[in-house]
Amino acid sequence: MGEVEIRRSRRRKRTVSAHREGDKTIVLVPAHLTAAQEAEAVRSLVQRLDRRDKRARPSDDELMARAAQLSRTWLGGSAEPLTVRWVSNQNARWGSCSSADRSIRLSDRLKGMPSYVVDYVLLHELAHLIEPNHSKRFWALVDQYPEATKAKGFLEGVSWTQR
């Protein structure tokens, strides 16, 4: 379950809520709750957050399956990575591709972003398996994706706010 911090409030009368701050779960509860009510609220809210995170954060295996689907749909199946995985050490890039070992790495900063954005970055890296640079041919491959412009704009906005 990870670390859970419970914050009681005398001003909070009925609602219980929870959110994540990094690896910590913060649960906000009214001060009048009994220990049993608090324990049930914490259990329920943490489970809900875990389910939401699982939907928003596909596993490496799910990324590999998604890469195969994107390759078939937009690249005629010609991009075939050997590995596709999340990494936590990419802070300047959204993804990277090594043509030599056919590996794709996506920054875990993408986790929780809309699926069309993750798909765009994944397709961008898949295209590098076909065209290793950012040539016109490369961009022609990537720009087949109908959400490409929207995803680029989303990522530019995120990057701008993180300056």
Image (cartoon, rainbow, N blue to C red):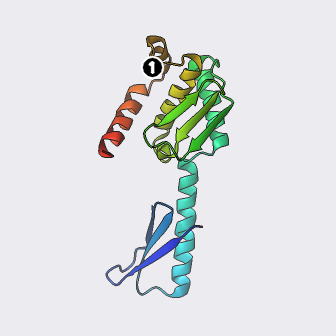
* Looking at the image, residue 5 lies above or below residue 140: below
Residue under circle 1? 143
Residue 102 in which image quadrant: top right
Q: How many marks?
A: 1
The answer to whether 61 appears left or right of 152 in the picture is right
Determine crowd level at label 1: few under 14, some 14-19, many 20+ residues with C-alpha closer than 10 A: some
Q: Residue at x 67, y 41 (%)?
A: 61
Q: Which residue does the image show at 49% across and 16% down from the upper left?
A: 138
Residue extending farthest top: 137
Q: Which image quadrant is residue 106 in? A: top right
**In terms of secondary structure, where does tag 1 sit?**
loop
The image shows residue 112, relative to residue 83, as above or below, that is below
Q: Amino acid at mark 1?
A: Asp
Left or right: 162 as drawn, with respect to 38: left
**Residue placed at 49% from the left, 18% from the top?**
133
Quadrant position of residue 160: top left
The image shows residue 18 at horizontal and vertical percentages of 45, 67
Percent coordinates x, y for residue 124 in the rendering: 50, 26
Give 76 or 103, whichever is nearer the viewer. Answer: 103
Q: Quarter of the image containing the N terminus?
A: bottom right
Vertical placement of residue 163 versus 24, above or below: above
x and y, in percent, of residue 117 in the image: 46, 36
Q: Foreground: 13 or 116?
A: 116
Q: Which quadrant is the C terminus positioned in? A: top left
* Residue 87 in picture, x, y percent from top left: 56, 44
